[in-house]
Image: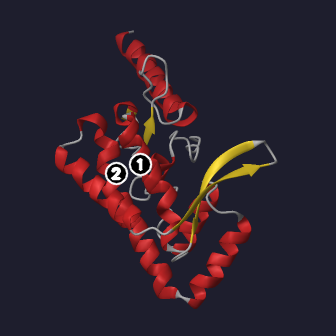
Amino acid sequence: MPRARTPFAAGRLWLDFVNSDEAPRHQQGDALASFDGYLGWLEGAGLVDAARRAALQRRAVEQPASATAALHEARRIRSALRPLAERGRQAAERVRQAAVLEINRVLGRSTGVRRIEHDPRDGSFSRAFLSTGDAFAALVIPVVESAADALVTGELARVRRCAAEPTCPRVFLDTSRGGHRRWCDMRSCGNRAKATRHRATIQDRRHRG
């Protein structure tokens, strides 16, 4: 049975966010199909912990309209970022502008404080955004900032589509030395491609024999 693709393997938060919409082409499903699924994705990405997720779930019951609006917002942002990720440096100007407008729209209305947080479990440090406004709307801020960083640092040149497309819709940051990485996950898509080539070679030899 084919191994499932490893979650959060894109190399950047915003690319993992783009990869959260696999439902049409893969059995893992769309993480943004529901608000609870959205919270699950955020927890998996390390943006909220279990306690905060539970608190947000309770608030969503009390404020369903706000939770639904936040979910629609997340889907809208993902829709703007996917074309940028899929085309990378070759993205048309209209695609870049659409992404920039969306990023600026979200950042322009964000209110809160930014701080560094330390995880004593592994000694790591991470940036955090603590909202002083709508707690639901602020959930997507780290994703948008990650996309903004990619534009500012020129990382789009290293963003790739998995070579297993169209069966795999994922994108990833190619950090290989030569810039020739082809698969979003070597253990799944890469191994499938190797197995397919191997079977094709055997069949070809049998045919010739």
Mark 2 / mark 1, whichever is N-terminal? 2
Q: Nearer the viewer, residue 44 or 96?
A: 96
Q: Residue sitting at 54 percent across and 88 percent down?
A: 63
Task: Please give the residue where the numbered disc 2 appears in the rendered image.
Answer: 82
The residue type indicated by label 1 comes to Ala
Q: Residue sitting at 64 percent across and 55 percent down?
A: 46
Determine the secondary structure under disc 2.
helix
The residue type indicated by label 2 comes to Arg
Q: Residue sitting at 52 percent across and 76 percent down?
A: 133
Q: Residue sitting at 65 percent across and 83 percent down?
A: 58
What is the residue that sits farthest to the top in this orientation?
209
- Tell me if residue 34 comes above or below residue 149 in the rendering: below
Q: Position of residue 201 (x, y in %)?
A: 42, 17
- Tell me if residue 134 comes above or below residue 164 in the rendering: below
Task: Please give the residue where the numbered disc 1 appears in the rendered image.
Answer: 147
Count of marks overlaid on the render: 2
Q: Position of residue 77 (x, y in %)?
A: 37, 61
Which quadrant of the figure has residue 181? Answer: top left
The residues tagged by marks 2 and 1 sit, at their Cα atoms, a distance apart of 11 Å
Q: Is residue 37 left or right of residue 65?
A: right
Q: Is residue 160 left or right of residue 56?
A: left
Q: Is residue 30 visible?
A: no
